[in-house]
Image (cartoon, grey):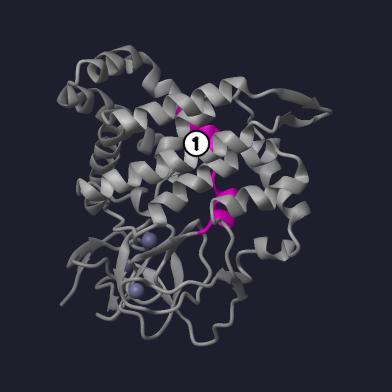
Amino acid sequence: MGLFSKKTAAEEPPAAPTVAQALDQLVQTSAKPSLFAHSEFVKQVSCPRCGAPKRLPSKTAYLYCDHCGSLVDYDFRLANSDTNAGLTNTVYHRLVAPVQALLNQARATGAADRYRELIRPVFAEWIRECPQAVSPRARTDEEFRDKMVTYLVECAVGKEFDPKITQLDQQMNAAIARLERWPNGDGPWRVSNGIWQVAELFKQEMELTYQLLEATGVLAIDPDEAPPGVPLRMEYSTFCQGWLPHLAPGDSDKFLGLFGLTGQYHRVDVTDAVTKKCGSCGDELRALPEASAVICESCGRKLDIAGGETPCQTCGAPLSFPVGVSGLECPYCHSGTHRI
Ligand SMILES: [Zn+2]
Ligand SMILES: [Zn+2]
Ligand SMILES: [Zn+2]
């Protein structure tokens, strides 16, 4: 979700076309530009919970297991094509600005509970306005969204109140301030070589942050139950999205390599997928026949596939109910229906 990258991006003047430009540049510099056609390719990764290999393509950067619905990985390439980091940063800064002085005061006096109280409404509103900044599960699932806000609050507190992390953060911001920015015709400005030091400091800061969040149990309250290493990769991904447009074209691969954001992709080869109707939003999705649970990428609900379809008692539409839900309003005919 790039929670900790916002500050970095704030140092830059807002540049609306950033993500599109990053994507263009990646396409230009990548040996295999067709990898961006995400309906054709899927990242090679296995589910850390059930071991199943990922076979179906994903609509968003959040890759969910085709069998159990767990979060499996985060796909940097898709992140570039389907989110707008510039926009979500802008929204975040608008929301945090009115309380920034009070947050600084709370941090300076070690008042963690006061800090929580101030930052919570900021994150809540940010997710409401920019659900695409976090997992698709936050789109309509209130309970999930609430847990996500709590998780973001605890991440912020953990980081902001740690002296070592704060120190690294200051060093990084100083390094950003020292960067030279050169005009580049109609394209985005180019940045000087100091960017490599910024990248190193960001990496150190994030490694330390996630060690701390792991040790203090904060990662355990992530409602997405992200597998180890994935939250860190999301931070790196957001950071790279912000800076790639400003690098010399030949430096992109080296920059991504520094953060381990490369990966193997394979062509989607699925002939046995079946179509299911989401009982929550009515959208159709493809599922493997042996799946137990899958995430509907349209509304973010985790659907029970193993339990079978339940025909709507009014219109007969075969609905896949969300896990743990026994009654709902049919998304097609809007009458109440329940599992028998
Ligand atoms: Zn799984
Ligand atoms: Zn749905
Ligand atoms: Zn119906």
Left or right, 78 with reference to 290: right
Q: Which residues are magenta?
A: 75-91
Q: Nearer the viewer, residue 240 or 195?
A: 195
Q: Residue at x 18, y 66 (%)?
A: 324
Q: Residue at x 25, y 30 (%)?
A: 120
Quadrant of residue 125 in the image? top left
| Residue 312, above or below 155 | below
Q: Quadrant of the C terminus?
A: bottom left
Which element carries disc 1, helix, strand or loop? helix
Disc 1 designates what residue? 201
Left or right, 216 with reference to 128: left
Left or right, 151 with reference to 275: left
| Residue 292, above or below 43 | below
Q: Position of residue 122 (x, y in %)?
A: 32, 27
| Residue 7, above or below 334 | above
Q: Residue at x 33, y 12 (%)?
A: 101
The amino acid at mark 1 is Leu
Which image quarter has ligand 3? bottom left
Quadrant of residue 243 in the image? top right
Q: Position of residue 68 (x, y in %)?
A: 32, 73
- Let me know if residue 84 appears in the view: no
Q: Position of residue 84 (x, y in %)?
A: 55, 40
Q: Residues within 10 Å of mark 1 (few under 14, many from 20)?
A: some
Q: Nearer the viewer, residue 285 or 104?
A: 104
Quadrant of residue 72 in the image? bottom left
Q: Position of residue 298 (x, y in %)?
A: 43, 58
- Answer whether residue 45 is magenta in the image: no
| Farthest right residue in view | 185
Q: Residue at x 48, y 82 (%)?
A: 273
Q: Main secondary structure of the magenta part?
A: helix
| Residue 257, above or below 117 | below
